[in-house]
Amino acid sequence: MYILVTNDDGIDSAGIHALVQAMRRIGDVVVVAPDRQQSAVGHALTVASPLRATPFHRDGEVFGYAINGTPADCVKLGVSTLLERRPDIVVSGINHGSNTSVNAIYSGTVSAATEGTLMGIPSMAVSLATFDHSADMSLAAEVAFQIASRLMDMGLPPGTLLNVNVPPVPREEFRGIRVTRQGHNAWDDGYDVRIDPQGRPYYWLTGEFTTVRELPDGDDHVVKNGYAAITPIHYELTNFAVLESLRSHPVLSEICVRDSNEGQA
Amino acid sequence: MYILVTNDDGIDSAGIHALVQAMRRIGDVVVVAPDRQQSAVGHALTVASPLRATPFHRDGEVFGYAINGTPADCVKLGVSTLLERRPDIVVSGINHGSNTSVNAIYSGTVSAATEGTLMGIPSMAVSLATFDHSADMSLAAEVAFQIASRLMDMGLPPGTLLNVNVPPVPREEFRGIRVTRQGHNAWDDGYDVRIDPQGRPYYWLTGEFTTVRELPDGDDHVVKNGYAAITPIHYELTNFAVLESLRSHPVLSEICVRDSNEGQA
C-alpha cells in the first residue's frame, strides 16, 4: 500500500508524526504537508502564487515535502506532480481539535481528504477532539490504523470520504468505534474588540462550541461519550429535500421556468 | 429590508458594485467585504491574527467596510460586531466566474452565504459564469434582484442557502431562471512546473473545467444553455445513502460497535 499523509497543523506537528508511524505499519508512506499551521483554512487552494516543495527532515532523515500552501494544495500537488506513483489512500491528520458537526466545513484536515476523494482516491481525515497540544496521540493513531488498513476494502462510493474523530480519553476508557452522522452543533462566537496604541480597533475571533441540537448518533455526541466516530461525508451539497418544493414554490414560480428534464438523475 | 452584501473578489470589484446597486432597489445596503481578492479561499476563517475594518470610499461616499480577511470573516465580523442591527438577508457576489458543480466547495462567494446561513439569516451567493473581468454585470444584477427580493418569503429551511449562477449572455439570449441541483463536473488540473533563476522548481496551478457527467438539471448544464441556475445547498455533509451500509459492512463491523440509538434522527 502506498499512503499519502498530510494535515493542516503543519509538517512539524506531533499529530502528523504519530499518524505517519501508524501508517508505516500498513505500507509505504509519503508525506506532503503544509510548512506551517493552516487551521480553519477550509477548502482553500492557492491560485494567485506559485507553490514550493521543500524536503523536510525529522530524526536525521527526509520525512516529507513541506509546501507553502494549504492542505488541499498539498494533496493536489502531491498526487498530480510530486509523487512517482498514485497513492492508494490519502490520510489527513491527526488534527489537534475536533472536526465534528459544523467544524467539518472549516477544516483544512477534512478538505485535504476531500481533495483526495475528488481525485478518485479513498481518503479519510482523523482528528483528536482536544486542543491540548501535549495530548497523547496514541489512541487516535491506533484508530487511524484500524480504519485506514480497511479503507480500500470498504468500497466507498465515489465522492464519499470518512471523517474520523477520536475522543481524548485514556485507552481504558475508550468505548470503541461507531459509524455516525455529522452533528448539528455549532460555535457561539463573536469578536473580542481591542484598541491598538494608535487608538484604532482590532478584532480577535473568540467563541465556544455549544450544543444546538444533540443527535443520538451525531459525531459530537458519540465522541463526548468516549467513542471514536466515523462519519461518511460527501461534497454533494444539493438539499434534495427542498428542490421540488422550491420548484413549485408560488413565490419562486413567478420568476422561474420549468423543464421536462427536471427531476431526472 | 436591511441587506448585507459581501463577495470574494474584493470590495473594489465591479461585481460587488453592480450587486450593491441592485440591492439598493430592495432596501438599505451595508457592505462588509475583503480588502483584496480572496478567490478559492473556501470556507476559511482568520483565527491566528486580528481583523481590521477600514471604511472604503467609492464615488465620494463611504461604500462599506474593507476587511483584511476572508468572505466568511466579513459575514461573521459584520453580523456579530460591526453592524448596528441584524441584516434581514446576506447576498454575496457578483463573483467573476462560475460557482457551479465542484466549484462551490472552493468558493469564497458561497462560503460567505454559508456563514450567513449558519447565523440564521436567509442567504444567497451570485456568480456570473465567466472569468472576463470586463463582462457586463447587468443581467446577473437583475437576476440577483429578482431572487433576493423574494428570499425572505421563500421559507428556506434552516441550514439551506441559494447558490445562483448566471450565464454570460446578452439579455435577449437569456432564457430565464431555473431551480437546479449541483452538477457533477470537475477540474482537470495539474501544475505548470517552472525553474527559477536559482535552478529550483516552483509550481503554478493550471487546469480546465471539464464535463465528468452531464446532469440534465445540473447547474452547469442549465447555465451553459442560457438559463440562470438556483441551487439550494446545505452544509449537512453526511452521505446518508451509505450510513446504514457502512454500519453493517463486514469489513467495518470487525472494528465497530453499534448502539440502539443509531438511525434515530
Image (cartoon, coloured by chain):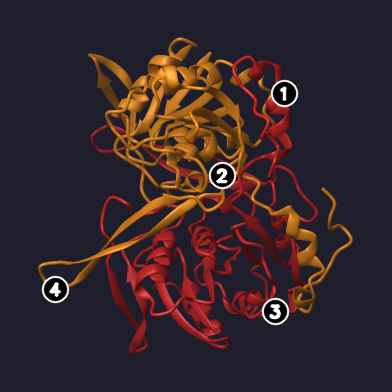
Chain colours: A red, B orange
Three-letter code, disc 2: Gly
Contact flag, marks 2 and 3 (Cβ < 8 Å): no
The chain identifier of the residue carrying mark 3 reads A
Residue A203 numbered tag? none
Camera-side residue of B106 and B72: B106
- The quadrant in which residue A32 appears is bottom left
Taking depth in this image into account, of A260 and A178 the one nearest to the observer is A260
Residue named by callout 4: B199
Q: Which residue is mark 2?
A: B183
A11 versus B65 height, above or below: below
Residue at point 62%, 80% (across, down): A145
Residue A116 placement, left or right of A159: left
The earlier-in-sequence mark between 3 and 1 is 3
Q: On what subunit does the disc labeled 2 rest?
A: B
Q: Which residue is mark 3?
A: A171
Report whether mark 1 lies on the same chain as mark 4.
no
* Marks 2 and 3, how far apart at CA: 44 Å
Q: Which residue is denoted by mark 1 in the rendering? A: A248
